[in-house]
Amino acid sequence: MNLKGRNALVTGASRGIGRGCAEELARAGANVAINYFSHREEAEEVAAVVRKAGGKALLVQGDVSNRERVEEMVAETASEFGSVDLFVSNAVYSDRQLMIEADLDGFRRTIDVGMWGAFYGLRAASLQMVKQGNGGSIVVISSPHAVIPVPTAMAYNMAKAAIDHMSRTAAIE
């Protein structure tokens, strides 16, 4: 895969799957904007990998459940790199409790980050790509939880099911 000259934004890129995506995009030649919420040190480690691979790295701190901040992150990426060609929606939060015992603030936060955060990123990146006129690629990271009900993970299951359908709908639009 040759992504030389392409510019990516990855949410939740300081750890786990998001980190892996950001590092692989860099190894393929992309410049990478690394979104993180609270793990700055780890985001800086990812930035070092991106730079070592020969790409530009941009740290973009922000909560993906905040629509305005997500729009700003996309704009910052486009301003710094010249475009947003690739977007990976990966950021997640998950409180794990039985539904009847769930702290509803944590339940809502799980939905806000997992579903609304994915939607805000998908929409903002799509608008930027349409504005640029060159298309682009968007990846939304989901989970088997979208179709397999796992106890103590109702909010997470709901968010993943929603983003699966959201992604399919966005693809045909």
Image (cartoon, rainbow, N blue to C red):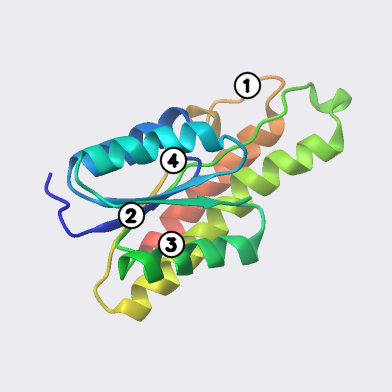
The nearer-to-camera label among 1 and 2 is: 2
> Which one is closest to the eye, mark 4 or mark 3?
4
Gap in Å between the C-alphas at discs 4 and 1? 18 Å
Above or below 152: residue 11: below
Question: In the image, is 95 to the left or to the right of 114?
Answer: right
Cα separation between marks 2 and 3: 19 Å
The residue tagged 3 is 170
Q: Quadrant of residue 79?
A: bottom left
Compute the Cα span from label 1 to label 3.
Answer: 26 Å
Q: Secondary structure at mark 2?
A: strand
10 Å crowding of disc 3: few (<14), some (14-19), many (20+): few
* Residue holding disc 4: 141
Answer with mark 1 or mark 3, whichever residue precedes in sequence: 1
- At label 2, which amino acid type do we have? Ala
Q: Nearer the viewer, residue 153 or 53?
A: 53
Q: CA distance from mark 1 to mark 2?
A: 32 Å
User: Which residue in the structure is indicated by mark 2?
Assistant: 8
Residue bearing mark 1: 150
Q: Amino acid at mark 4?
A: Ile
- Residue drawn at the location 28% of the way across and 63% of the way down: 136
**Would you say the residues marked 4 and 3 are in contact, meaning their CB atoms lie under 8 Å apart?**
no
Residue 153 in the image: above or below residue 14: above
